[in-house]
Image: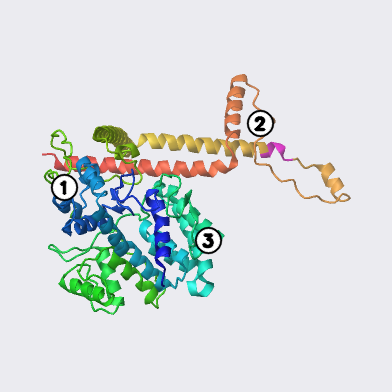
Amino acid sequence: MQLAALQKAAAQAIVNIFETGSIRGNYGDVTLLRGDSGQLTYGRSQTTLASGNLYLLIKDYSARSDVAYAAQCVPYLPGLEACDTALNTNMEFRGLLKDAGDDPVMHEVQDAFFDRVYWDPAIRSADALGVQTALGAAIVYDSTVHGSWARMRERTRQKVGELSAIGEKAWMAHYIDTRYDWLSTNPNALLHKTVYRMDALAALIRTGNWNLKLPFAVRGFTITADALGENTAVRVPAESAPRRMLRYKSPPQNGPDVVWLQERLARAGIRVTASGVFDAVTDAAVRAFQENHDLKVDGIVGPVTRSALEDISVTSPTKSAVTDEPMPAVANAEARAVKPSAPPARDGAPARRPSPAPEPEPAPAPRPARSSPPPAPPSDASQGDDPVGDIKHHVTAEVKAGVETVRKSLRDEHEKLTQRLNSSIQNEVSDVLAGVKDHLKTRGQAVLKDVAGGRPIIPAVLSGVTLALTEARDFFSWKEAATNTPTTGAANTATSATVPVTAPTAVQTTIDQTTANPPSNDTVAQIYTYLHNLAASVPNEWVFRLRVGAFALIAYAIFRLWRRRAEAAKAKKGAP
């Protein structure tokens, strides 16, 4: 794809507006937003500290012999390479970056750097995808700068297919919708505020200005020689986490990003084993890949080489159904606190106002997880030229961070106390239940022992009473049956010849409590009535059960008698 110089400038101006709120870009803009995974960002296209790109930019700038701030920037290079988070709030370093942004040489370095790191990889990805228009190139360039271009490209390809199948205009419209949905629902709430980028690009698609013919408007700016109006841009990288630079060092780097690198190199036709360790063989493979793709051969896998490796999914698609994923983000394990010495003022330049000597600061706290709100960063006002204001905002952020730390400590102590109380209560309840269980077990054993060692007279008496009750009931039942049986006489015999014989009346065995005929004596009658009623209260089905119980008691009495006789014989035998 060949773009005219004016088309390239227009496409870059669109992203400059998104990033810094300026058509030409703000070369000295330093930004730190709360919750920004990229941490400190700087320059025309807002390169980040966490990604390592800020280190590469300042390294290129310091290597020039005609720069104004080389001597002051060099001491910060180790901290930049280590992605030292202390540089986020280093007001002296941030002031140096702002001053360097006024250096014309910094403008040249940034233009060349961002072309090499963002523009050239974006055009290469656009060519691999089949993009032909200037607006399509601007869309790819914006996503490359903002982040997650490869991820959203693959998601769009899975949803609607290849660009060549449905056409560039339709494919780009689907890509804008896909990226808009992803930004608006991203777990990082700051990305919700960046959907204006997709709104602006969608507006250009609706106007049909695919060749970026001047003039045209973007977010209140008219892309001409002069900028109209001012908007505050929200600059948040769309990467969920920064990807570290990979290179051959001692000790060697390792992790899933190294495995991803080795697998992509193998797909590019370079023989390398996916060991997960960046060793000398992997370094040689990276250099061979860079040479084959006309990249700078330095063995460093930064954004340029990484973008070329991500494009392999388009230029050399795999035959398997596995989805191509971009390089995974791995925390920079080599990060360390580096405190450079105070850089001297450059010749001919006004000396920077010295800051009061601070007390030694503790090591910077790790970045909080997304689920907990991180400490508030300096506001936009703290990014001006007032060092006193910067210090105030810095102190405010530190105080808020301290308050949050105290709150977290109190919550942790409360949870620990609650756990200890719950554990103590559970232990007390368990002890009480165990004591009750042991007591019941002991008492049960004592009862069984008393029963087993009882005298045989007790079950014998109980069995006698039970049998007496059941036999009394049978006695009263038979007596009632005998009373209710009709008598036979001559009259019955006489009539039996003429009257059919009927079936005999069945004898009712259930005692009728209302038809008892007690003897005439009052005392005897009362006893008779009581025994009659007592026998009548026993149901028929319980008679058999009571007899069985009585026989069991008799058997037990015999067993106890035998045991007592055996114990007596044993005692007598053992006596002297």
Distance from the alpha carbon under mark 1 to that under mark 3 = 47 Å
Q: What is the three-letter code of the residue carrying label 3?
A: Ile
Q: Nearer the viewer, residue 126 or 267?
A: 126
Q: Is 575 on the left or on the right of 159, as rendered?
A: left
- Name the residue located 29 percent from the left edge and 50 percent from the top edge: 42
Q: Which mark is residue 337?
A: 1
Nearer the N terminus, badge 1 or badge 2?
1
Residue 459 visible in the current orientation: yes
The span shown in magenta is 481-485
Find out whether the residues at labels 1 and 3 contact each other: C-beta distance under 8 Å: no
Distance from the alpha carbon under mark 3 to that under mark 2 = 107 Å
Q: What is the three-letter code of the residue carrying label 2?
A: Gln
* Nearest-to-viewer mark from 3 and 2: 3
* Nearest-to-viewer mark from 1 and 3: 3
Q: Is residue 372 above or below residue 317?
A: above
Q: Is 546 on the left or on the right of 371, as rendered?
A: right
Find out whether the residues at labels 1 and 2 contact each other: C-beta distance under 8 Å: no
